[in-house]
Image (tube, rainbow, N blue to C red):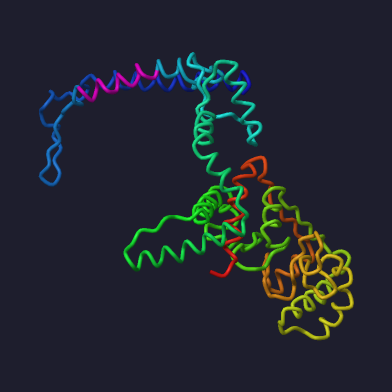
Amino acid sequence: MTSFWSIWVIVLTLSCLFILFGLLVWNLKNYAGVPEGESCGHEYDGIEELNNPLPKWWTYMFFATFVWSVYYLAAYPGLGNWEGFAKWTSSNQGITSLTESKEAVLEAKEDGRFVKLDAEYRAAEERFGPIFNELAQIPVLDLVESKFAGDAAQQVALENGTKHEQTQGQLAVEIGQRLFSQNCAQCHGSDARGGTGFPNLTDKDWLYGGSPDKIRETLLLGRVAAMPPWGDALGEQGVKEMTAYVLSLSGRTVNQKDADAGKAKFAMCAACHGPDGKGSVAHNLPFGAPNLTDNIWLYGGSQRAVEETLNHGRAGVMPAWKEILGEDKIHLLTAYVYSLSQDK
């Protein structure tokens, strides 16, 4: 932070401490005009207020916190840009990838600094890294098959009261589920059923393909979709007609005259959605254009929602996770996501 804000934080922090210390000392004196232990003259519901001071041990604890604060603010970051003589920091600000985090660890070690977050990462990597690496060598299809077989065996064991040994597939998918909860649930929901603008991962409708390889590719590299706005090109009536045609593709009841007029204009959409409107996946295209014939809608399938999409376009972004999670974790996350849409 700048020198100004550093000084601001120092002044604010120390001022608060001095004020609190002053209030504590001030309240040690009896200003009530009533001797200690005697009644203050207040009574409610049979309960009388006495002029009793804080217990001595409680007062001593207050003073102890001020003594501790002097040591804490001298040893640890708390006063603006002051790093503290202990050279300790809880995190590396600005770190966005595993590579940068590893570089920061080396830099901190060279400077003699102890970075708690890096130490926790190292400990976790040493403990769980070999497990992730071992499971990442197993193909996703084998992991998912092992997971379902393990689930079936576990159910039988529960019914028979016997012990079940967790399969590698069950372990991999369980780890993938936790990775999903930590990194993906914010957009796709804790149940992975998505929401407006965020795909449902539990069905078989995939914008870029639902094979393990395609899911892994999406996780590694991310996706950037771009549905252009057509409002200016089509005009108000043209948007209305195109909306009618698009809705008719999924079996909706529409104004047939408008739908026929919209069909004549659909050629401008066919480059991405295909001439039949079945989307990029059906025609092996890389655009991520959705299937318009299945009545599954990413941004809503009402007439108003479709008109809004045509007028203003859509621009969905799936971030890339390669540098954040690493390939081994993404392999396990792929197994989990793939398992969600498979018949149990």
Residue 128 horizontal side relative to residue 294, left or right = left
* Foreground pick, 246 / 60: 246
Residue under the image location 72 percent in, 84 percent down? 253
Q: Is residue 327 above or below residue 259?
A: above
- Residue 2, magenta (yes or no): no
Name the quadrant containing residue 258.
bottom right
* Foreground pick, 344 / 219: 344
Image coordinates of residue 250 in percent, x first then y, are: 72, 78
Residue 197 horizontal side relative to residue 180, left or right = right
- Residue 65, magenta (yes or no): yes
Q: In which quadrant of the rendered image does the N terminus lie?
A: top right
Residue under the image location 16 percent in, 28 percent down? 52
Q: Which residues are magenta?
A: 57-69
Residue 224 horizontal side relative to residue 133, left or right = right
Image coordinates of residue 41 in percent, x first then y, are: 13, 34
Name the quadrant containing residue 279.
bottom right
Image coordinates of residue 194 in percent, x first then y, are: 60, 61
Residue under the image location 63 percent in, 41 percent down? 324
Q: How many marks?
A: 0
Residue 237 horizontal side relative to residue 145, left or right = right
